[in-house]
Image: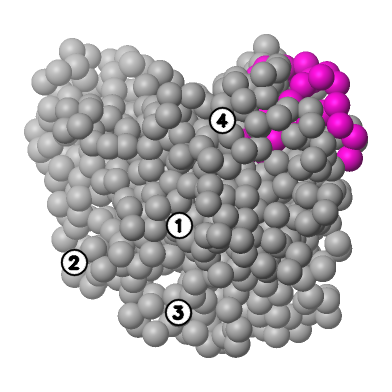
Amino acid sequence: MPPPLPIDRPSTSIKVWRVVVLAIAQAVTLLVVDLLVDDFRIDGFVNALGMVITLAVLNAFLWPLIVRVALPLILLTLGLLTFVLNAAFVWAAAAIVGGVEVGSFWSAIAVALALAVVNIIVGGILSIDGDHAWQSRIVRRVVNRVEHPERGDVPGFLFIQIDGLGHDVLEDAMVSGDAPFLGRLVSSGTHRLLEWECDLSSQTGAMQAGILLGDNHNMPAFRWYEKDTGRIMVTNRPKDAAEIETRQSTGVGLLLGGGASRTNVFSGDTDDTMLTFSTAGGKLLGRNRFLYVVSTPYALFRIIALATADIVRELRAARRARRHGVQPYGHRGGVYPLLRASTTVVLAEITWSILVADIARGVPTAYVDLVGYDEVAHHSGIAAPDALDTLRRTDDQLERLLTGLSEAPRPYYLVVLADHGQTQGATFKQRYGETLDEVVQRLAGEKVAAPVLAEEGWNNVSGLLTDAAADESRMGKVVERATRSRAVDGEVVLGPATEEQLDDHDIVVLASGNLGLVSFADIPGRATRQRIEEANPGLIEGLRHHDGIGFVMVRDEVLGDVALGPNGIHHLADGRIEGEDPLMVFGPNTADHLRRTSSFDNCPDLLVNSFYDPVADEGAAFEELIGFHGGLGGKQSRPFVLAPAGLPQPEHPLVGAGSIHTLFKSWVAETQGSTVDAGAG
């Protein structure tokens, strides 16, 4: 059975004092509102304290009932009805306490908002919500009314993925105090920190296909061009994710048999999905999925306040980085602060709320992807203060979530992992003044198609809206109407939405982090080195000798697959080296990764990887991201698994997402008595 987790729970006396301090702070807040708002009056501190206590009682006992009855209207108004209900609670408390006058709806809203802000600030300072007990109790009540979970002793699994967090970055964060809870998991002996190695390409789509579905064959990058269809596939674009899952699913998914997929690219072969790209736009299993997001009366106040704080946090961090001349410096202007808040706060809060309900429901397995750290690290750097701050908040949220495990209907094993890490450095364009497609066009001397595609963060928000708009509830209809102008074939598209029309004369250039894919659309099948040099003499030689490129993989009609570097060749067929080995700095398994990718039907004609400097520990993304992943080199290929110490540990190095799938499936089979094949597919 899973051992107790080392959750930092304050003593009862400390809890009582914290609640008393918060109540006093809220009472003082009411007196301040009395001074600032003309039509709100309260007669002294005693009445203010009485009103705080009365509001707490009303929220604790009435809110679950009201949410259950009024949920359709709450969703129809996108949660705005909660403002009205909070105002009604203020009026009710004033009537019960006496000595309080609430002159208008707006003054009642002002009171509720002020109390919510103080609750967030003071509660955060005092760690009052550290045990998460109140929200967990409310969620359990709602779940018991809606779903009636059965209690049992068979352990479940919570797979929590912290997107983009490398093994070494986590290890340092545990020492520095930026991941204290994860650090205690290791120091207490309940978990072991394992390192594993990504496949090529090191990005969420391919890694989750391997982990969740058991197969990521024929997925060479985050986005790729398919010659046979003339299409560009993007792994976290809903329509493409759905098609990819159909191709990759082997029927042995990690979440088969009642599991829950939350904020993932793929479903893991479960029907219970939410905020999952491969099923976004489809009918959701069950009813009232967003019920738990509004399970507490201040939920929307909290989300709005925290999102606003994160926008301010990003603006301050960007200004500080510019003022101090921090390098490398990524693009952080425009609407990026809003995009960041959407992923680090809004999407995270929705995800945590639903996961609380999943635990209360007793789902056998749940797999959740938390994308906040990955998004911030892309633009700030993998160990930048604001990236580590995002990690610290994720660590805290995870600990708060798990405080309710003792009252779950089943025990749970906690598995925390990353799908990949990130490497960092100034971008290719920042270093050399031109993008990869511009280099290819200059060397080839002909037209190059480089479609403008939304980056990963935009697609995360687009997937959320697509999923919500497809819901058959009233809320879904409201979201659908609100996003209709941005809908394309049933998919909400935010950010850049244009794709150049591809024709038979284009060279197609795509980028996935520091991995470049060059395809010759007018050459059927895999274009060989000789064919490319005949059509575009000087292109391959120009690329392999570019200072920003580490190697180029191409198929030679005589030599087979080769990796060409500036001063040498690695023959992939037999491992023979001519001159300096261009793969030496990328790790001992690099040749195996390239051979595997070369076997894909969708392997590009030229696979281009940026340079990697092991001394400076940096490379260069072909996208405008200073923290990047997708290719080879550095920390991007080395994520982690925090594995429960009581379960069988791997006997061999974990290489490839398929090895993680096999390990996780073996754990589930051993603890739950599953008869489903635990193989990697």
The residue depicted at 51 percent of the width and 80 percent of the height is 644
Mark 2 highlights which residue? 14
The residue depicted at 82 percent of the width and 36 percent of the height is 531
The residue depicted at 69 percent of the width and 61 percent of the height is 571
Q: Residues within 10 Å of mark 2 (few under 14, many from 20)?
A: few
Q: CA distance from mark 1 to mark 4?
A: 20 Å
* Mark with earlier residue (4, 3): 3
In the image shown, does 37 or 413 lie closer to the viewer?
Answer: 413
Q: Mark 4 or mark 3, which is nearer to you?
A: 4
* Mark with earlier residue (3, 1): 3
| Quarter residue 109 falls in | top left
Residue 37, x across and y down, in percent: 19, 16
Q: CA distance from mark 1 to mark 2?
A: 45 Å
Q: Residues within 10 Å of mark 3 (few under 14, many from 20)?
A: many
The residue depicted at 16 percent of the width and 61 percent of the height is 17
**Residue flagged by tag 3: what amino acid is it?**
His
Mark 1 highlights which residue? 634
**Residue flagged by tag 1: what amino acid is it?**
Gly
In the image shown, does 608 or 103 lie closer to the viewer?
Answer: 608
* Mark with earlier residue (1, 4): 4
Answer whether residue 465 is visible to the viewer in this image. no
Asked if residue 498 lies in the magenta stretch, the reply is yes
Q: Mark 1 or mark 4, which is nearer to you?
A: 4
Residue 652, x across and y down, in percent: 60, 84
Numbered range of the magenta stretch: 497-525
Mark 3 highlights which residue? 191
Task: Look at the numbered disc 3 and give the secondary structure of its residue.
Answer: strand
Asked if residue 529 lies in the magenta stretch, the reply is no
